[in-house]
Image: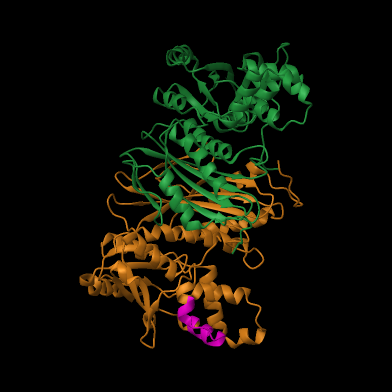
Chain colours: A orange, B green
Amino acid sequence: MARRKATQPIQEFPLIRQLQRRHERRSPLIRKGIGDDAAVVSIPAGDWAVLTTDLLTEGVHFDLRTASPASVGYRAAMANLSDVAAMGAVPRLLLVSIAIPPTLRAADIHALYRGLMSACDQHEVHLIGGDTSASHQGLFLNITLVGTTARGQALFRKGARVGDGIYVTGTLGDSLAGLQLLTSRSSSQRRTALKRIDRDFLIDRHRHPTARVREGLWLNQTQLATAAIDLSDGLSGDLRHVCEASLVGADIELSHLPISPACRAYADKQRLDPCTLALAGGEDYELLFTVAARNEQKLERQARARRFLVTKIGTIRPRRFGLHSLAFDGTRVPLPITSYRHFT
Amino acid sequence: MARRKATQPIQEFPLIRQLQRRHERRSPLIRKGIGDDAAVVSIPAGDWAVLTTDLLTEGVHFDLRTASPASVGYRAAMANLSDVAAMGAVPRLLLVSIAIPPTLRAADIHALYRGLMSACDQHEVHLIGGDTSASHQGLFLNITLVGTTARGQALFRKGARVGDGIYVTGTLGDSLAGLQLLTSRSSSQRRTALKRIDRDFLIDRHRHPTARVREGLWLNQTQLATAAIDLSDGLSGDLRHVCEASLVGADIELSHLPISPACRAYADKQRLDPCTLALAGGEDYELLFTVAARNEQKLERQARARRFLVTKIGTIRPRRFGLHSLAFDGTRVPLPITSYRHFT
């Protein structure tokens, strides 16, 4: 049994009751939420349930010296909302487990849950349970998110076919640029060389990414996408997952990668190629999806009507083609393996 | 990004593929298992889904110096199976997140999953997904278990009424006795004083507890139980949860607590009161449930026919009565707060 060093020891059952009081919401789906041996929920008749889980560890996935507990909670929720979005499902219910180190105060834990639930509230996702425990060292946070989708309707990584257009939502590389701004030790002169508005935009994109839930639902319901994944490990790595699952290759046009003006300005100041940020940057939480050639115009028309930013960045090729990118100078090189890794 | 110290570094994606190859099973419920952004499952039409999650941390919930990785996995699965059993539901699907410290080898991880899945295979529970990550220090394991139950049918902590009989399945205190045998520093003489068969029984009850899934289903389907909980924190603490949720009190007869011969022999040798082990011992994973007085005979008859061991240990009283226990000498004392805590 762990002993807490914090001046105000955190008690498990009072903490659970506080979290329940602050964050429990009524929903016709929830038959029993927090406070029993298990939660009991009513999945809409005939729907499929979509389940995803993520375990985030301090020092690996986040750093409490540069990120606030609220931001850690927010981003953890968004990572899971994004996984459900990539399946084309409606996120619904949330279970949160937390292992609390002796260095954290009760106020930190409540801030973390506030961050978590502010991300969830945007999508009417309700907390139905979890677990709280002590950790001897480091904060560990596990999120399980449950979504629903109509029976027979879901977007998978598998399904991309030769000739399909490769699309992404939003802009790429912003989150990595924001992270670098937060953690870089470069001189303050360089930092201030970037306009305040650009700096704020990039840091906000890192701290408060947006899961593309509406876009995923649209792609699933219209059946316009043949495959989909969310960009959590970086375009280069995640495109590889789609190609492996679909048994295909891919050709990416670097000049087509959607880069925000702020990210481009940041890359200029840092003398970086913005495409490197776009290819390697994890945690953009945009969607990457493929569309049959005959549906591309329809897709782009619908996206404009819905004010969704989507960009065609390449084409699915046969498997033997591998994964390549066409550079600005017209040369074609293998897509680098620069995926964001938390592991080795 | 963490660096692994182990001689054979564990790679995330190959590990996931190995786990998938070894542990993925087909089931009509599973539309997409391991290997996409989320799992997709088909809950039987009209059923409720039951969800529980547990985060286990090294040094708090288990000690890899006294427990094998396989045993840690087995017990983690059983703890969650037991939560689903206490709801009267059928356990179905499993998500496992693991944060791996640099000290663990790939063989340890596979042993842990073997333990996990050997518990799950007993109940035809299938692995559908999870997450793997590095941990700077200590092994962290999060299990999310999904069960199903017929709409409108579940056992809750709430529901016990004044006059109901209080029952438990199986015997109590064995797991704590087994843990003490494994970790005690008492002289080897004392240890050998306990018969080998008793020692083995108690250690096995600690290492390989059995979730009372069949008993939970029976209690739920027959609607004989008015409330239920599983004994994970100890009888004293868990009975308190039922009483708080049901707004009642309870009177326990200590002479009625079901104590195994092995546990009684252990308590004798250690000069302990076996009732203390039964009241305080966590992780027995027996069920505690309440039954209306008019149904007690019927319940006991059905239990005998099914060869389920159930024992009446007390009676639900009004809330103002509090929680009391009747000792062997006829005195009635408040039930001690001796619940097993992982937190403070």
Residue B294 in the figure: left or right of residue B138:
left
**Residue B335 lies in the magenta stretch:** no
Please say if A22 is above or below B239: below
Instruction: Looking at this view, name the residue that lies furthest to the front.
Output: B7
Q: Quadrant of residue A74?
A: bottom right
Please say if A229 is above or below B225: below
Q: Residue at x 44, y 31 (%)?
A: B122
**Residue A265 lies in the magenta stretch:** yes
Q: Residue at x 46, y 65 (%)?
A: A232
Q: The N terminus of chain A lies in which quarter of the figure?
A: top right
Residue A149 in the figure: left or right of residue A237:
left
Q: The C terminus of chain A lies in which quarter of the figure?
A: bottom right
Residue B139 in the figure: left or right of residue A273:
right
Residues B40 and B288: in front is: B40
Please say if B332 is above or below A187: above
- Can residue B53 be seen in the rendering of this structure? no
Q: Quadrant of residue A226?
A: bottom left
Residue B30 in the image, given as x and y percentages of width and height: 34, 45
Total marks shown come to: 0
| Magenta span of residues | A263-277
Residues B153 and A239: in front is: A239
Residues A14 and A329: in front is: A329
Please say if B114 is above or below A236: above
- Can residue A217 be seen in the rendering of this structure? yes
Residue B65 in the image, given as x and y percentages of width and height: 68, 40
